[in-house]
Amino acid sequence: MYWRNYLALLKSCPTTWADLLEATVLQVLPRRRGNFRIHVAGDFFEQAYVDAWCEVARRFPRAQFWAYTRAFHLDFS
């Protein structure tokens, strides 16, 4: 499942990533009671991906998003 999601992102335009990720959040968030772990496996692979997740988090201000990362070269501010 995770690999399929990653490949779907790579095949799409980065400007649509936030919308694609939002669809995933909408499927999972109701079961998680407002908590969403961004990655179970994998990591942030480029800045546009980080930016898309930041946009998704802004769309769900009452949810808590969290992720572990080793991609310290990217800007998470």
Image: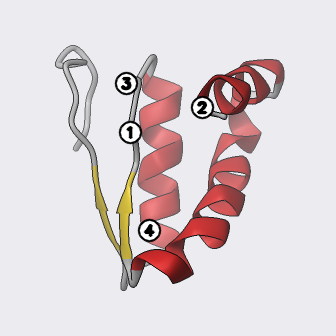
Q: Which residue is mark 3?
A: 43
Whether residues under marks 3 and 4 lie with C-beta atoms below 8 angstroms apart, the answer is no
Q: Amino acid at mark 3?
A: Asp
| Mark 2 vs mark 3, CA separation in Å | 11 Å
Residue 42's x, y, as percent? 41, 23
Instruction: Tell me, for residue 40, which label it has, or none.
Output: 1
Whether residues under marks 2 and 3 lie with C-beta atoms below 8 angstroms apart, the answer is no
Whether residues under marks 2 and 1 lie with C-beta atoms below 8 angstroms apart, the answer is yes
| Mark 3 vs mark 4, CA separation in Å | 20 Å
Q: Is residue 58 left or right of residue 25?
A: left
Q: Which residue is mark 4?
A: 58
Q: Earlier in the sequence, mark 2 or mark 3?
A: 2
Residue located at (64% from left, 25% from top): 6
Q: Nearer the viewer, residue 63 or 4?
A: 4
Residue 24's x, y, as percent? 65, 57
| Mark 2 vs mark 4, CA separation in Å | 23 Å
Nearer the observer, disc 3 or disc 4?
A: 3
Nearer the observer, disc 2 or disc 3?
A: 2
Q: Nearer the viewer, residue 8 or 28?
A: 28
Q: Earlier in the sequence, mark 2 or mark 1?
A: 2
Q: Earlier in the sequence, mark 4 or mark 1?
A: 1
Picture quadrant of residue 63: bottom left
Q: Is residue 7 left or right of residue 74?
A: right
Instruction: Tell me, for residue 2, which label it has, or none.
Output: 2
- Say which element carries label 2: helix
Q: Amino acid at mark 2?
A: Tyr
**What is the quadrant of the C terminus in the image?**
top left
| Mark 4 vs mark 1, CA separation in Å | 21 Å
- Say which element carries label 1: loop
Nearer the observer, disc 4 or disc 1?
A: 1
Q: Earlier in the sequence, mark 2 or mark 4?
A: 2
